[in-house]
Image (spheres, grey):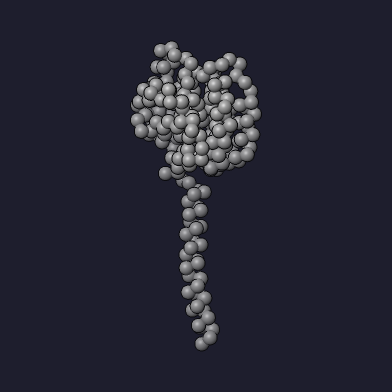
Amino acid sequence: MKTRTLTTRTRRILAPLCCLFCLALLDGCGSRQRLTPVASFVGVDASVSTRHCQPAYVALISGYTGRLEPDCDHLTIYRVERQTFEIFDDRAPGNQEAMQARMVAQLRKHPREDGTYPALFWKTVAERAEHASGKVLVTLYSDGDNDDQTETARETIRAAARRLAANPHVVAVAICGVNPDNRAALRRLFQPCGDRLLLFGPDQLDQNTLHRLHALVQR
């Protein structure tokens, strides 16, 4: 009788605990084993005018990197100035500290010529996004300046915006750190992207923006 009573009590105690444990385990598996891969294309403005914002760029890029899945996600990072240089292209490293060190080393180098010419960045990522699998997030960390005001450069950006908008895998095109004076011009250039264009101001280079960017690829 005592043995049966003890067993019943034990079951009553363990049953809800087992349920909670299983739910936690399933939740953990869902967050760590996302079925849809993510391709992230990141540009960082390395021009002189953004030097004061670059520590925040590094913090957000490394923070985002640490949330990606090394087993399935892909990360490509470009340094954007007068030219556009690819500085990383591989599976997501899953190591926030290593990415932070890499970005600091890259941005420590001063550009050979000042100015931000982003047309090549947008053209490149629009082309590569068409060959990416899973979800695609394109992010440029910049004040939004475009020092190449030729019609050729503007049309290159408009064409890239059209390609990104036509790509069903692209969940968002985000520009982080945009000065208010540049918002209207960016909205005109990226008008085809509609609600998928996200502009964050210099006062939004924080954890809230990091959470929002990460949430876009978790849906």
Q: Is residue 106 above or below residue 2?
A: above
Residue 14 makes an appearance in the image = yes
Q: Quadrant of residue 105?
A: top right
Q: Residue 165: where, in percent of width, then height? A: 37, 29
Residue 41 or residue 144, whichever sits in front: 144
Q: Quadrant of residue 53?
A: top right
Q: Is residue 78 above or below residue 94?
A: above
Residue 18 or residue 63, whichever sits in front: 63
Q: Residue placed at 47% from the left, 59% from the top? A: 23
Q: Residue placed at 39% from the left, 21% from the top? A: 185
Q: Residue placed at 60% from the left, 31% from the top? A: 103
Please count the marks in the image. Answer: 0
Residue 182 or residue 82, whichever sits in front: 182
Q: Residue placed at 55% from the left, 33% from the top? A: 56
Q: Residue 136: where, in percent of width, then height? A: 45, 35
Side of 123 relative to 114 (left or right): left
Q: Residue 83: where, in percent of width, then height? A: 54, 18
> Which quadrant of the rendered structure holds the C terminus?
top left
Side of 131 relative to 77 (left or right): left
Q: Residue 104: where, in percent of width, then height? A: 63, 30
Residue 124 makes an appearance in the image = no
